[in-house]
Image (tube, helix red, strand yellow):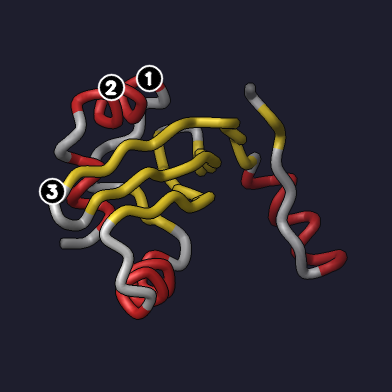
Amino acid sequence: MPLKELLLNSSSFTELLKQHSINPADFTIKDEGFIISDKLLSKEDVFKEMILIEGHNESGRINLIGTIYCNFVKNIAVFELESAERVKEDTANALNRESGEGGADREG
């Protein structure tokens, strides 16, 4: 089961999405496929991994950075938020033109 589906089964995670006005259908876990394949190859049932969740709302893009704790046997996952960054599109676009990198403002 994909990490996104496991997280959406958690009421605390869906509440976190609501706090940041992110539609549950409108977020991605950066490198989700790589994380899952790496953990499946290691044959671990339970793992802990730092992840980046990219979400979108009316204000633009929001990055949620934190740790996911996942148990594949019980099909549960918990996300522990460490910081949230609102990416200002005009700032990101200007930086992309100058250096090919994006910029972000920290919220917490």
Looking at this view, name the residue that lies furthest to the bottom: 41
Disc 2 versus disc 1: nearer the observer: 2
Amino acid type, mark 1: Gln
**10 Å crowding of disc 2: few (<14), some (14-19), many (20+):** few
Say whether residue 58 is left or right of residue 105: left
Q: Nearer the viewer, residue 103 or 2?
A: 2
Tell me the number on the disc at residue 74. Answer: 3
Q: CA distance from mark 2 to mark 1?
A: 6 Å
Where residue 64 sits: x, y (%)?
51, 39
Judged by depth in the image, the label closer to the viewer, 2 or 3, is: 3
Circles 2 and 1 in contact, beta carbons < 8 Å = yes
User: Is mark 2 in CB contact (under 8 Å) with mark 3?
Assistant: no
Q: Quadrant of residue 106?
A: top right
Q: Quadrant of residue 1?
A: bottom left
Amino acid type at mark 3? Lys
- Label of residue 15 in the image: 2
Q: Name the residue beneath numbered marker 1.
A: 19
Estimate the x, y position of residue 3 in percent, counting from the top left: 27, 55
User: Which secondary structure lies at badge 3?
Assistant: loop
Residue at x-position 19% and y-position 44%: 76
